[in-house]
Amino acid sequence: MPSTDSSPKPVDSQINGESEGDHHRPVLPVAFLRRIAERARTLAGEFAAAGDRAGWLREQIRWRWFTYRHRHEAAANRAFDARYGVDTATDVPLADAGVPASEVARCNGIYRAVTESAFRAALAAVPVDPSDYTFVDVGSGKGKALLLAAEFGFRDVIGIEYAIGLHRVAERNLARWRQRSTAQASPRSVHHDALTYPLPDGPLLVFVFNALAPALMRQLVDALDRRATDRPAEPLILVYVNLRHVREIGDALAGAVSLRTRVRRRHHVVLANTAAGV
Ligand SMILES: C[S@@+](CC[C@H](N)C(=O)[O-])C[C@H]1O[C@@H](n2cnc3c(N)ncnc32)[C@H](O)[C@@H]1O
């Protein structure tokens, strides 16, 4: 995962090594331009030395685009927190949030909030009336997807989180959000392992933002597929989101009998049974 460090860089006068008496001189100049020239020389050298130049260029573009997007998303995440007076934007290694080391290896190792844009894009691919559905977030962390789902108009909103530290932050966030929101639903966070939590009856939309390693994701899909087979008249939808690429989950979403892939894009996959009508 990329670093999310966005702390302010030292002021230019420090970068340029100017003394106090130099402050009347322009700040940007020589050292900065020299750095750009050095960087350009390094890149030109790498390009010249690359065996596969087209591949090298593709990799550069991909990396730069990822970095740009990450900065943009980090700013949007902070703006979301400011809007509701909550704390969801900061990443947390799960080992620091009360998850035992043996468990950390079974999931993706880190708490990171879903971005509002990825959440909205994924749900836009699911043309159902949210007020008919209970939204369940598998691995709900600090509760951001719960807040988004409640604003979206789901009938009921439940988050299942097994890291006690994150669950507590989620409860605080939900309390703060309630003071500012006019949404009807009253989202809640449950401290539990999502794979053993008994899901509520009725139409369900199960949301997973990159919470589980492929083997556990497969277990979840199998369990949901069994439920869909046992209850053919009850709408069941699974939305999987990945900010890098859904192929990271491998074939964990394939092979279900009653749940079928309805939408597959770079950042989300939607599985649903026939009763969901998706
Ligand atoms: C990438 S974060 C997603 C947070 C949240 N869903 C969101 O979209 O903002 C994944 C979360 O899943 C949790 N998690 C992983 N495996 C879990 C499990 N088996 N049961 C409950 N929570 C789990 C982690 O502790 C982490 O908070």
Image (cartoon, helix red, strand yellow):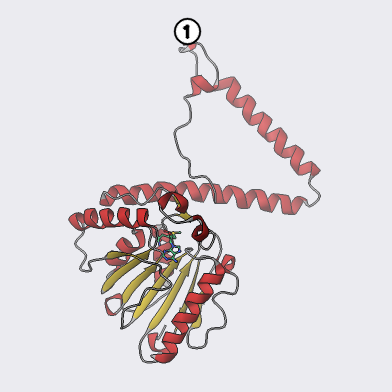
Position of 219 compared to 45: left or right? left
Can residue 105 be seen here? yes
Task: Tell me if residue 43 comes above or below residue 148 in the rendering.
Answer: above
Q: Position of residue 42 (x, y in %)?
A: 71, 35
Task: Tell me if residue 226 comes above or below residue 20 in the rendering.
Answer: below
Residue situated in front as seen by the camera: 265 or 84: 84
Residue situated in front as seen by the camera: 252 or 127: 252
Q: Position of residue 70 (x, y in %)?
A: 49, 49
Q: Write down the residue under mark 1.
A: 21
Residue 180 in which image quadrant: bottom left
Task: Tell me if residue 46 comes above or below residue 257 in the rendering.
Answer: above
What's the residue at 39%, 89% (across, down)?
275
Can residue 142 be seen here? no
What's the residue at 35%, 88% (across, down)?
234
Q: Position of residue 144 (x, y in %)?
A: 35, 58
Residue situated in front as seen by the camera: 252 or 241: 252
Q: Respond yes or no on whether mark 1 lies under 8 Å from ligand 1.
A: no
Identify the amino acid type marked 1. Answer: Gly
Q: Residue furthest top?
A: 21
What's the residue at 45%, 48% (across, down)?
72
Task: Tell me if residue 84 comes above or below residue 188 in the rendering.
Answer: above
